[in-house]
Image: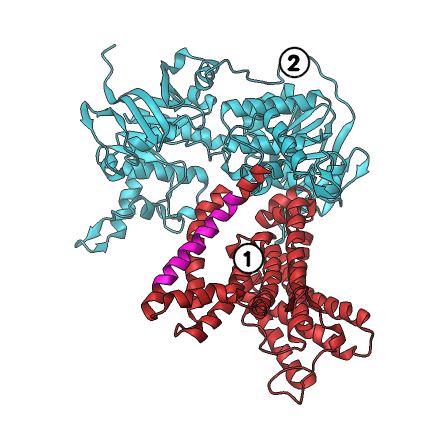
């Protein structure tokens, strides 16, 4: 066990150092704009743990980030630069909502899995499209996933405004989904979604699948050198497509779990660019599933903490954008050396 | 005979990068007007030594005496001012420019000091080409030239600086056999004009063909300097490797008997997207226990032949049979199951994933067979011990199971690929360019493995553009030209002349 522990320490040393350095530089910045830098920093980092409800909001924020980041891990490991997390998330959320509203008469034990599955499948389809285009026609996946984001956001906007709109509410939001299929809260944390548990379990499963199965080894072979994978008898094109289907499915699942666990309806603006932030989480974690869980938690803490900080001091919450930018910079600066060490 | 005129003398040159010594002690005397070969295995320090002479690196110790004066070569410009011209292994030409433009790049003749004088430039290029008898068109764009012609442009470029001492760094690495012969002719011509040439190579055949004297470098030390006429290839090989080298070969072995055909190609044709014939009705047969060597100048269909047999590219006509089974339409993994072992020609392209670990690379085709899975998951412990065994068995140096494959040297990467493919004890071993870029020690090892497979009754199809390799290992030799199998010769009737003749499409002129 000791070597495994040492190995773990070696892997997290670089990101940890980058995070600490970012926080230290950020502190200098905060000190220059406010009289209460310590207070501001305390709120940024620790207000998430002040109360059970703050903690619940923190977990609710981390859940979609983790799932999207896991999806990104699958696609990147297969060599696909998938920036379509946002579209896949929205497709999952809106599909789950439509199914839940349309099937309101079904018993909950049927409807709940049905809605979740529908969201997952919708995301998977959105992931499948750029995968197939890439493999069969060599269409650049950055272009297709980005464009699909826009297409899907517009479709969901139309659905939310025209089809499933809650006419009694303000803004582009759908009718509530039946309360019988709301996800139960986490034990001991009343307002936190149990979707977080799903995210944690899937992080571990993803790691097992990618690094401890032959299928995962084949996906990574295809992702690192497609022609090598072919020459060892791997159906490389199929592996790449299935990795993209899983990527989309995970993001779609994030959308479905958000609707059933947190929002209880589809809101057109429910995502503060979860897709992009999830991508950043995955990259900061060096495209590692377990690492992605950690970076997603960190990002959730920063995003929520910035709001508390803005309320209690005069430091604007956009500080967090600056800090994350700095973190990305420091991480990538270290990446080259670290990449050689792994 | 008078005291030889020494143009260049190196004494106790040492150079280290960080704490790694590339050169520890090199002495070298080069006589004016001779062709002097520097010979050594990959990593022996040949290139470092040449880069010191070219002014790219500075030595940590030792002295350089040029034309009787001690000199420091601060940078490449200083080197050319001192009359040292370097032709690098990788060409430094601009493909879109003409031969003349490349020759005078950065020093075009000018009119009024501003406008480049094209006519004068072409004229001077023409003179230069004529003086050395190089047969080049000064106004042809470099991208239209063959590799051999490009190399001559490089040599001219060095000579245009009035280099007395010309350094050729592994000049034959990129050339086809007929081009090598032409280069040797060019070098002879330069010597006749009084130029001194330092020729770097690790190919023994060339040492004998081209040089007056040969200096062997091993592990950063100069081992010996001798007259080429007084030594044999085996002597040089021994100095390079530091021990007796067993140059393996099948020649001279007793009459062999072969088993049933393992692989049969029946009039296989392949066409690319634009309709060009890549393979034209190729038929061949490899029997159990036999090594069939396929010779040919690169790019005459050997790559496509391998891909057709491996099932990586579809064939439009003909049959590929393994034993009695028709596998023309089968996937690579089905062919593996039928007994194919495939070592691709380029280990970086198809052979390995350089960012994955040694263990994962060597296990890639063997997870099920080598029992590395338990309960659907990869057993990490078994994977590591499996990789450890292969590393040991194939003497993959500098590798642990968790090492990234990209960190290994070319020879060790190649051993990894071969270890992976031989693990299944394939009934047909398809092995392409097995020793490209490998040094003597590693080549010797790979060759022994190939012959071992044949001796165990496996069929081996060896595709190589290295003629000496084909001759050393094959029981029969097929020659490809322009997508066609010109002929398949028995080893006894195959001599270099016949094979070379067929490699050029059956015409006498060099390609």
Is residue B280 rendered magenta in the image? no
In the image, which residues are magenta? Answer: A9-28
Residue that badge 1 annotates: A282
Q: Quadrant of residue A195?
A: bottom right
Magenta span dominant secondary structure = helix
Residue B417: image x %, image y %? Answer: 60, 34
Seen from the viewer's position, the closer of residues A90 and B134 is A90
**Circle 2: is it few (<14), some (14-19), or many (20+) Cα within 10 Å?**
few
Picture quadrant where residue A151 is located: bottom right
Q: Residue at x 41, y 52 (%)?
A: A333
Q: Using a 10 Å C-alpha cutoff, classify the residue at mark 1 as few (fewer than 14 neighbours), some (14 to 19) or many (20 or more).
A: many
| Element type at mark 1 | helix
Q: Chain of mark 2?
A: B
Query: Looking at the image, is mark 2 or mark 1 nearer the viewer?
Result: 1
Q: Which corner quadrant holds the N terminus of chain B?
A: top left
User: Residue at label 2?
Assistant: B253
Q: Is residue B88 above or below residue B273?
A: above
Chain identifier matching the red colour in the rendered picture: A
| Residue B419 in sight here | yes
Secondary element type, mark 2: loop
Cα separation, mark 2 vs mark 1, equals: 60 Å
Q: Nearer the viewer, residue B261 or B275?
A: B261
Dot label at residue A127: none
Q: Give left or right: position of B114 versus B166.
A: left
**In the image, is A58 to the left or to the right of B59?**
right
| Colour in which chain B is drawn | cyan
Image x and y of residue B382, in percent: 67, 34
């Amino acid at each position: 066990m000791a070597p495994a522990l040492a190995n773990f320490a070696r892997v997290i040393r670089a990101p940890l150092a980058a995070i600490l350095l970012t926080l230290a530089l950020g502190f200098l910045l905060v000190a220059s704009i406010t009289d209460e830098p310590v207070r501001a920093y305390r709120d940024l980092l620790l207000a998430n743990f002040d109360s059970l409800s703050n903690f619940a909001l923190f977990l609710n924020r981390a859940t979609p980030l983790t799932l999207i980041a896991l999806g990104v891990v699958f696609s990147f490991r297969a060599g696909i630069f998938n920036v379509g997390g946002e579209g896949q998330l929205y497709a999952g959320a809106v599909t789950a909502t439509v199914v839940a509203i349309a099937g309101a008469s079904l018993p909950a034990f049927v409807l709940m899995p049905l809605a979740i599955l529908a969201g997952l499948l919708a995301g998977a389809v959105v992931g499948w499209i750029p995968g197939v285009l890439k493999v069969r026609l060599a269409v650049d996946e950055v272009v297709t996933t980005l464009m699909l984001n826009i297409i899907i956001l517009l479709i969901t906007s139309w659905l939310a405004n025209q089809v499933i709109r809650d006419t009694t509410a303000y803004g582009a939001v759908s009718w509530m989904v039946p309360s019988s299929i709301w996800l139960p809260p986490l034990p001991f944390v009343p307002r936190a979604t149990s979707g977080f548990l799903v995210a944690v379990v899937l992080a571990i499963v993803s790691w097992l699948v990618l690094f401890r199965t032959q299928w995962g080894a084949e996906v990574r072979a295809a992702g690192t050198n497609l022609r090598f994978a072919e020459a060892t008898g791997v159906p490389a094109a199929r592996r790449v497509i299935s990795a993209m289907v899983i990527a989309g499915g995970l993001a779609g699942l994030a959308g479905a779990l958000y609707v059933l666990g947190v929002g209880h309806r589809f809101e057109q603006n429910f995502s503060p660019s979860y897709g992009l932030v999830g991508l950043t989480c995955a990259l900061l974690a060096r495209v590692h599933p377990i690492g992605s869980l950690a970076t997603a938690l960190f990002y959730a803490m920063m995003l929520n903490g910035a709001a508390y900080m803005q309320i209690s001091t005069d430091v604007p919450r956009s500080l967090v954008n600056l800090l994350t930018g700095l973190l990305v910079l420091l991480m990538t600066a270290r990446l080259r050396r670290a990449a050689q060490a792994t | 005979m008078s005291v030889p005129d020494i143009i260049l003398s190196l004494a106790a040159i040492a150079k280290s990068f960080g704490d790694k010594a590339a050169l520890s002690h090199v002495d070298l005397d080069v006589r004016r007007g001779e062709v002097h070969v520097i010979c050594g295995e990959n990593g022996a320090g040949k290139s470092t030594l040449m880069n010191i002479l070219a002014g790219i690196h500075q030595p940590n110790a030792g002295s350089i005496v040029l034309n009787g004066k001690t000199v420091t070569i601060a940078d490449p410009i200083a080197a050319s001012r001192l009359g040292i011209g370097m032709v690098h292994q990788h060409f430094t030409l601009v493909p879109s420019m003409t031969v003349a433009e490349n020759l005078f790049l950065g020093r075009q003749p000018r009119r009024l000091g501003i406008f480049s004088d094209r006519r004068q430039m072409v004229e001077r290029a023409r003179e230069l080409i004529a003086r050395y008898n190089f047969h080049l068109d000064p106004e042809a764009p470099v991208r239209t030239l063959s590799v051999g012609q490009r190399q001559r442009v490089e040599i001219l470029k060095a000579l245009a600086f009035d280099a007395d001492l010309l350094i050729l760094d592994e000049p034959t690495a990129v050339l086809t056999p007929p081009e090598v012969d032409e280069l040797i002719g060019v070098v002879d011509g330069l010597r006749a004009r009084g130029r001194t040439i330092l020729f770097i190579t690790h190919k023994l055949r060339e040492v004998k063909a081209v040089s007056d004297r040969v200096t062997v470098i091993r592990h950063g030390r100069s081992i010996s300097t001798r007259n080429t006429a007084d030594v044999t290839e085996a002597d040089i090989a021994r100095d390079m490797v530091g021990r007796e080298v067993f140059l393996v070969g099948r020649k001279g072995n007793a009459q062999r008997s072969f088993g049933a055909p393992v692989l049969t190609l029946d009039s296989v044709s392949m066409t690319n997207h634009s309709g060009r014939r890549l393979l034209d009705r190729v038929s061949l047969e490899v029997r159990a226990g036999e090594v069939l060597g396929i010779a040919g100048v690169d790019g005459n269909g050997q790559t496509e032949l391998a891909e057709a047999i491996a099932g990586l590219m579809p064939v439009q006509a003909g049959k590929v049979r393994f034993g009695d089974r028709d596998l023309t339409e089968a996937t690579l993994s089905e062919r593996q199951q039928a007994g194919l072992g495939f070592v691709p020609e380029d280990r970086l392209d198809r052979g390995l994933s350089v960012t994955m670990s040694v263990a994962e690379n060597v296990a890639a085709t063997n997870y099920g067979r080598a029992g590395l899975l338990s309960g659907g998951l990869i057993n990490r412990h078994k994977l590591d011990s499996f990789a450890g065994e292969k590393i040991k068995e194939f003497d993959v140096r500098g590798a642990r199971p968790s090492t990234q494959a990209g960190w290994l040297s070319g020879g060790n990467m190649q051993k990894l690929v071969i270890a992976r493919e031989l693990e299944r004890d394939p009934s047909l071993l398809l092995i392409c360019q097995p020793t490209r870029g490998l040094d003597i020690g590693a080549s010797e090892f790979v060759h022994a493995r190939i012959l071992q497979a044949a001796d165990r009754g496996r069929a081996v199809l060896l595709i190589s553009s290295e003629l000496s390799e084909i001759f050393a290992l094959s029981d029969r030799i097929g020659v490809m030209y322009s997508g066609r199998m010109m002929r398949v010769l028995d080893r006894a009737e195959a001599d270099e002349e016949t094979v070379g003749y067929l490699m050029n499409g059956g015409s006498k002129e060099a390609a």
